[in-house]
Image (cartoon, rainbow, N blue to C red):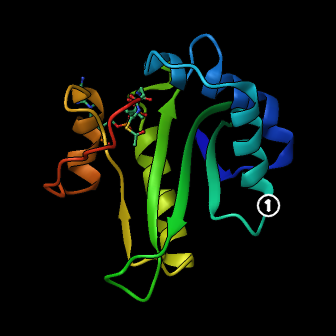
Amino acid sequence: MSTIRLIEEKDKEEWINLFSGPDGYLVFYKSTLPNNVIETTFNRFLDKDEPVNAAVAIDDSTGKIIGFANYVTHRNTWAIGDSLYLNDLFVSGESRLKGIGRKLIEFIYTEADRLKCEKTYWQTQFENHRAQLLYTKVGEKAGFLTYKRPSE
Ligand code: ACO
Protein backbone atom coordinates (compact mmCIF):
# COMPACT_ATOMS: atom_id res chain seq x y z
CA MET A 1 0.00 0.00 0.00
CA SER A 2 1.08 3.56 -0.57
CA THR A 3 0.14 7.01 0.66
CA ILE A 4 0.27 10.23 -1.36
CA ARG A 5 0.94 13.51 0.42
CA LEU A 6 2.47 16.94 -0.20
CA ILE A 7 6.24 17.07 0.01
CA GLU A 8 7.86 18.13 3.30
CA GLU A 9 11.31 19.37 4.34
CA LYS A 10 12.30 15.94 5.69
CA ASP A 11 11.85 14.47 2.18
CA LYS A 12 14.78 16.39 0.70
CA GLU A 13 17.39 13.61 0.49
CA GLU A 14 14.99 10.97 -0.81
CA TRP A 15 13.33 13.31 -3.32
CA ILE A 16 16.74 14.41 -4.65
CA ASN A 17 17.81 10.79 -4.95
CA LEU A 18 14.66 9.86 -6.87
CA PHE A 19 14.88 12.97 -9.04
CA SER A 20 18.57 12.93 -9.89
CA GLY A 21 20.09 9.76 -8.41
CA PRO A 22 21.40 6.70 -10.32
CA ASP A 23 17.95 5.17 -11.08
CA GLY A 24 16.06 8.43 -11.03
CA TYR A 25 13.94 10.63 -13.22
CA LEU A 26 16.74 12.62 -14.88
CA VAL A 27 18.48 9.38 -15.85
CA PHE A 28 15.22 8.27 -17.50
CA TYR A 29 15.50 11.43 -19.63
CA LYS A 30 19.28 10.91 -20.13
CA SER A 31 19.70 14.34 -18.54
CA THR A 32 21.59 16.00 -15.74
CA LEU A 33 20.99 19.27 -13.92
CA PRO A 34 23.38 21.40 -11.87
CA ASN A 35 23.03 20.92 -8.10
CA ASN A 36 21.94 24.52 -7.57
CA VAL A 37 18.95 24.00 -9.87
CA ILE A 38 17.90 20.88 -7.97
CA GLU A 39 18.36 22.64 -4.60
CA THR A 40 16.42 25.69 -5.78
CA THR A 41 13.56 23.55 -7.06
CA PHE A 42 13.33 21.70 -3.75
CA ASN A 43 13.44 24.94 -1.76
CA ARG A 44 10.65 26.35 -3.93
CA PHE A 45 8.41 23.39 -3.01
CA LEU A 46 8.60 24.56 0.63
CA ASP A 47 8.11 28.25 -0.11
CA LYS A 48 4.42 29.17 0.16
CA ASP A 49 5.01 32.20 -2.11
CA GLU A 50 6.27 30.03 -4.98
CA PRO A 51 3.81 28.45 -7.45
CA VAL A 52 5.90 25.25 -7.44
CA ASN A 53 5.00 22.20 -5.40
CA ALA A 54 5.28 18.43 -5.29
CA ALA A 55 3.41 15.40 -4.07
CA VAL A 56 5.24 12.25 -3.00
CA ALA A 57 4.16 8.62 -2.86
CA ILE A 58 5.27 6.79 0.29
CA ASP A 59 5.57 3.02 0.57
CA ASP A 60 3.54 2.34 3.73
CA SER A 61 5.66 -0.67 4.70
CA THR A 62 9.07 1.05 4.47
CA GLY A 63 8.17 4.73 4.87
CA LYS A 64 10.33 5.48 1.81
CA ILE A 65 9.45 7.76 -1.09
CA ILE A 66 8.75 5.70 -4.21
CA GLY A 67 7.35 8.36 -6.52
CA PHE A 68 6.67 12.03 -7.03
CA ALA A 69 4.65 14.51 -9.03
CA ASN A 70 6.18 17.99 -9.35
CA TYR A 71 3.81 20.71 -10.52
CA VAL A 72 3.54 24.41 -11.20
CA THR A 73 0.51 26.67 -11.25
CA HIS A 74 0.29 29.69 -13.54
CA ARG A 75 -2.05 32.27 -15.02
CA ASN A 76 -3.96 31.52 -18.21
CA THR A 77 -5.28 34.18 -20.58
CA TRP A 78 -8.37 32.04 -21.26
CA ALA A 79 -9.57 31.74 -17.67
CA ILE A 80 -9.87 33.57 -14.37
CA GLY A 81 -8.51 30.60 -12.45
CA ASP A 82 -4.95 29.36 -12.77
CA SER A 83 -3.78 26.28 -14.67
CA LEU A 84 -1.81 23.44 -13.13
CA TYR A 85 1.08 22.05 -15.15
CA LEU A 86 2.32 18.62 -14.07
CA ASN A 87 6.02 19.10 -14.77
CA ASP A 88 7.42 15.72 -13.69
CA LEU A 89 5.86 12.38 -12.83
CA PHE A 90 7.99 9.47 -11.66
CA VAL A 91 7.57 6.12 -9.94
CA SER A 92 10.68 4.10 -8.99
CA GLY A 93 11.35 1.11 -11.22
CA GLU A 94 10.44 -1.58 -8.69
CA SER A 95 7.18 0.14 -7.71
CA ARG A 96 5.65 0.51 -11.18
CA LEU A 97 2.42 -1.05 -12.44
CA LYS A 98 0.91 -1.02 -8.94
CA GLY A 99 -1.33 1.99 -9.44
CA ILE A 100 1.00 4.57 -7.89
CA GLY A 101 1.28 6.73 -11.02
CA ARG A 102 -2.51 6.82 -11.20
CA LYS A 103 -2.76 7.75 -7.50
CA LEU A 104 -0.26 10.59 -7.98
CA ILE A 105 -2.28 12.01 -10.88
CA GLU A 106 -5.52 11.69 -8.92
CA PHE A 107 -3.87 13.56 -6.04
CA ILE A 108 -2.84 16.29 -8.49
CA TYR A 109 -6.45 16.59 -9.64
CA THR A 110 -7.50 17.09 -6.00
CA GLU A 111 -4.79 19.73 -5.62
CA ALA A 112 -6.00 21.47 -8.79
CA ASP A 113 -9.51 21.64 -7.29
CA ARG A 114 -8.17 22.94 -3.96
CA LEU A 115 -6.17 25.62 -5.76
CA LYS A 116 -9.14 26.43 -8.01
CA CYS A 117 -7.17 25.63 -11.15
CA GLU A 118 -9.43 25.44 -14.18
CA LYS A 119 -7.07 23.35 -16.26
CA THR A 120 -4.63 20.54 -15.45
CA TYR A 121 -2.27 19.39 -18.15
CA TRP A 122 1.07 17.78 -18.90
CA GLN A 123 3.17 16.61 -21.82
CA THR A 124 5.08 13.49 -22.61
CA GLN A 125 7.40 12.25 -25.31
CA PHE A 126 5.82 10.61 -28.35
CA GLU A 127 7.81 7.44 -27.68
CA ASN A 128 6.83 7.17 -23.99
CA HIS A 129 4.19 4.52 -24.66
CA ARG A 130 4.28 3.19 -21.11
CA ALA A 131 3.28 6.54 -19.63
CA GLN A 132 0.64 6.95 -22.31
CA LEU A 133 -0.99 3.66 -21.26
CA LEU A 134 -1.73 5.42 -17.97
CA TYR A 135 -2.48 8.85 -19.46
CA THR A 136 -5.17 7.60 -21.82
CA LYS A 137 -6.98 6.21 -18.75
CA VAL A 138 -6.76 9.25 -16.48
CA GLY A 139 -6.70 12.04 -19.06
CA GLU A 140 -7.49 12.93 -22.63
CA LYS A 141 -5.15 13.87 -25.47
CA ALA A 142 -5.05 17.67 -25.85
CA GLY A 143 -4.03 17.48 -29.49
CA PHE A 144 -1.27 20.11 -29.39
CA LEU A 145 2.39 19.80 -30.39
CA THR A 146 5.01 21.51 -28.23
CA TYR A 147 7.60 23.79 -29.87
CA LYS A 148 10.51 25.52 -28.19
CA ARG A 149 13.07 28.18 -28.94
CA PRO A 150 16.02 26.55 -30.72
CA SER A 151 19.03 25.76 -28.54
CA GLU A 152 21.97 28.13 -28.98
N1 ACO B 1 0.67 -3.15 -20.40
C1 ACO B 1 -0.62 -2.89 -20.13
N2 ACO B 1 -1.04 -1.86 -19.38
C2 ACO B 1 -0.11 -1.06 -18.89
C3 ACO B 1 1.25 -1.27 -19.13
C4 ACO B 1 1.64 -2.36 -19.92
N3 ACO B 1 2.94 -2.61 -20.21
N4 ACO B 1 1.91 -0.32 -18.51
C5 ACO B 1 0.99 0.45 -17.90
N5 ACO B 1 -0.23 -0.01 -18.12
C6 ACO B 1 -1.48 0.55 -17.65
C7 ACO B 1 -1.92 -0.23 -16.43
O1 ACO B 1 -2.97 -1.11 -16.80
C8 ACO B 1 -2.41 0.84 -15.48
O2 ACO B 1 -3.79 1.08 -15.66
P1 ACO B 1 -4.86 0.91 -14.44
O3 ACO B 1 -4.60 2.05 -13.48
O4 ACO B 1 -6.19 1.02 -15.08
O5 ACO B 1 -4.58 -0.41 -13.83
C9 ACO B 1 -1.61 2.04 -15.93
O6 ACO B 1 -1.24 1.88 -17.25
C10 ACO B 1 -0.33 2.13 -15.10
O7 ACO B 1 -0.66 2.80 -14.07
P2 ACO B 1 0.20 2.86 -12.76
O8 ACO B 1 0.55 1.50 -12.23
O9 ACO B 1 -0.57 3.77 -11.88
O10 ACO B 1 1.53 3.58 -13.28
P3 ACO B 1 2.97 3.48 -12.65
O11 ACO B 1 2.91 3.56 -11.18
O12 ACO B 1 3.68 2.34 -13.26
O13 ACO B 1 3.62 4.86 -13.18
C11 ACO B 1 4.84 6.04 -14.80
C12 ACO B 1 3.61 5.20 -14.53
C13 ACO B 1 4.85 7.26 -13.89
C14 ACO B 1 4.81 6.52 -16.25
C15 ACO B 1 6.11 5.18 -14.54
O14 ACO B 1 6.12 4.13 -15.45
C16 ACO B 1 7.42 5.93 -14.62
O15 ACO B 1 7.84 6.60 -13.68
N6 ACO B 1 8.10 5.84 -15.79
C17 ACO B 1 9.39 6.47 -15.99
C18 ACO B 1 9.30 7.99 -16.00
C19 ACO B 1 8.20 8.49 -16.88
O16 ACO B 1 7.96 8.04 -17.99
N7 ACO B 1 7.51 9.53 -16.38
C20 ACO B 1 6.44 10.20 -17.08
C21 ACO B 1 7.02 11.23 -17.98
S1 ACO B 1 5.82 12.40 -18.56
C22 ACO B 1 5.72 13.54 -17.27
O17 ACO B 1 6.56 13.57 -16.41
C23 ACO B 1 4.55 14.44 -17.19
Q: Residue 15 placed where, x, y %?
A: 70, 33
Judging depth in this view, the residue of 99 and 69 nearest the camera is 69
Residue in front for this viewpoint, 70 or 77: 77
Q: Quadrant of the C terminus?
A: top left
**Which quarter of the image is occupied by the N terminus?**
top right
Is residue 62 among the parts visible in the rendering? no
Observer-nearest residue: 68 or 85? Answer: 85
The residue lying furthest to the front in this view is 152
Q: Check the image and report above or below for 74 versus 24.
A: below
Instruction: Please identify the quarter of the rendering in which residue 46 is found.
Output: bottom right
Q: Is residue 61 left or right of residue 82?
A: right
Residue drawn at 21 percent across, 28 percent down: 129
Task: Answer with left or right where residue 38 lies relative to residue 27.
Answer: right
Q: Name the residue beneath numbered marker 1.
A: 47
Q: Residue at position x 63%, y 51% from top?
A: 54
Asked if residue 116 can be seen in this view, the reply is: yes
Helix, strand or loop at label 1? It is loop
